[in-house]
């Protein structure tokens, strides 16, 4: 049986619950065990008047064992469902910062890109690169680098709107999706994020002078057919980021 065909039965058992599954197992196990026993007796040419005790002997253990087996099966299915749900949740959320994962970002971006093309409205994206994270990791350890990433994610989130999507884009970078936003507003938001990070003071354990935190931001906007896909739009944002980095970092590039 294929996974797709088995899926409705699995969901049906999960809705049934342990008690209902145990009752169903009893109703099915006894007749099935008796049927198998009857087939064996018939093949062995045992007279029908001698079937009573063998049939009872087959059905009774099956009836006693079925509820426990059914409850165990349903419990295992519940645990499997919970584990799968947790795995799916983790795949959509960056485990360190708690923001969206790269996978979820692209799912949202693809849907929003298609919507923006239908409605002929702009869709900007930001690519935010944390300047000097490698130096912080080398000088103070990766635990310090993780603290910095958490702080930067929090600062970015604090300056975005509820319907914007912030995601971990790479080891030291984030991406932001800004639905229904003009290019000028996107640049304003990018500058606000850059300023918020520059204002962070992050004490690190064992570090006398906290490192200065800076980000460089690349902005690109899908409008009037200037991008054929989300990948194309992200490439434009990466190019804008690269130009800003070449110009000295800690700035917004378009």
Image (cartoon, rainbow, N blue to C red):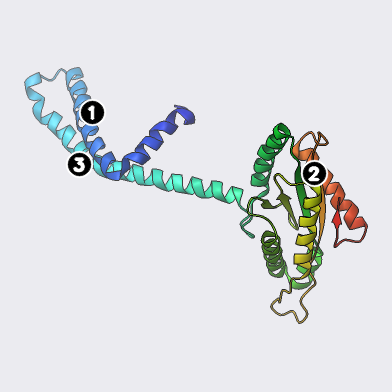
Give the vertical position of 66 relative to 43 (above or below).
below
Residue 39 position in % (x across, y down)? 21, 21
Residue 64 - label: 3
- Identify the image quadrant of residue 159: bottom right
Relative depth, front residue between 48 and 23? 23
- Residue at left offset 76%, top offset 35%: 229
Provide the secondary structure element on which disc 3 rests. helix
Q: Are marks 3 and 1 in contact (CB under 8 Å)?
A: no
Q: Earlier in the sequence, mark 3 or mark 1?
A: 1
Residue 234 position in % (x across, y down)? 78, 44
Relative depth, front residue between 213 and 141? 213
Provide the secondary structure element on which disc 2 rests. strand
Pointer 3 local density, CA inside 10 Å: few below 14, some 14–19, many at least 20: some
Q: Are marks 1 and 2 in contact (CB under 8 Å)?
A: no
Pointer 2 local density, CA inside 10 Å: few below 14, some 14–19, many at least 20: many
Q: Which residue is mark 1?
A: 32
Q: Earlier in the sequence, mark 1 or mark 2?
A: 1
- Give the total number of marks visible in the rendering: 3
As drawn, the residue found furthest toward the left would be 49
Q: Is residue 235 left or right of residue 6?
A: right
Residue 9 position in % (x across, y down)? 38, 32
Q: Which residue is mark 2?
A: 221
Give the vertical position of 242 relative to 70 (above or below).
below
Give the vertical position of 56 relative to 67 (above or below).
above
Relative depth, front residue between 115 and 137? 115
Pointer 1 local density, CA inside 10 Å: few below 14, some 14–19, many at least 20: some
- Residue at left offset 17%, top offset 33%: 59
């Amino acid at each position: 049986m294929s996974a797709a065909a088995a899926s409705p039965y699995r969901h049906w058992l999960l809705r049934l619950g342990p008690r209902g599954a145990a009752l169903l197992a009893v109703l099915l196990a006894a007749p099935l065990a008796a049927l198998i026993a009857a087939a064996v007796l018939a093949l062995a040419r045992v007279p029908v008047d001698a079937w009573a005790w063998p049939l009872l002997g087959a059905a009774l253990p099956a009836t006693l064992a079925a509820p426990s087996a059914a409850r165990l099966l349903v419990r295992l299915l519940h645990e499997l469902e919970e584990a799968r749900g947790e795995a799916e949740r983790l795949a959509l959320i960056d485990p360190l910062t708690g923001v969206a994962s790269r996978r979820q970002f692209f799912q949202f971006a693809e849907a929003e890109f298609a919507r923006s093309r239908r409605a002929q409205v702009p869709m900007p994206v930001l690519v935010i690169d944390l300047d000097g994270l490698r130096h912080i990791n080398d000088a103070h350890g990766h635990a310090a680098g993780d603290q910095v990433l958490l702080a930067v994610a929090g600062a970015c989130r604090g300056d975005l709107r509820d319907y914007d999507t912030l995601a971990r884009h790479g080891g030291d970078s984030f991406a932001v999706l800004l639905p229904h936003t003009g290019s000028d507003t996107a640049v304003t938001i990018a500058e606000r994020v850059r300023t918020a990070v520059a204002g962070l003071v992050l004490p690190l354990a064992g570090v006398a002078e906290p490192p200065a935190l800076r980000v460089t931001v690349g902005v690109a906007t899908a409008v009037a057919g200037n991008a054929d896909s989300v990948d194309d739009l992200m490439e434009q944002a990466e190019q804008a980021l690269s130009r800003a980095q070449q110009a000295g970092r800690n700035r917004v590039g378009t």
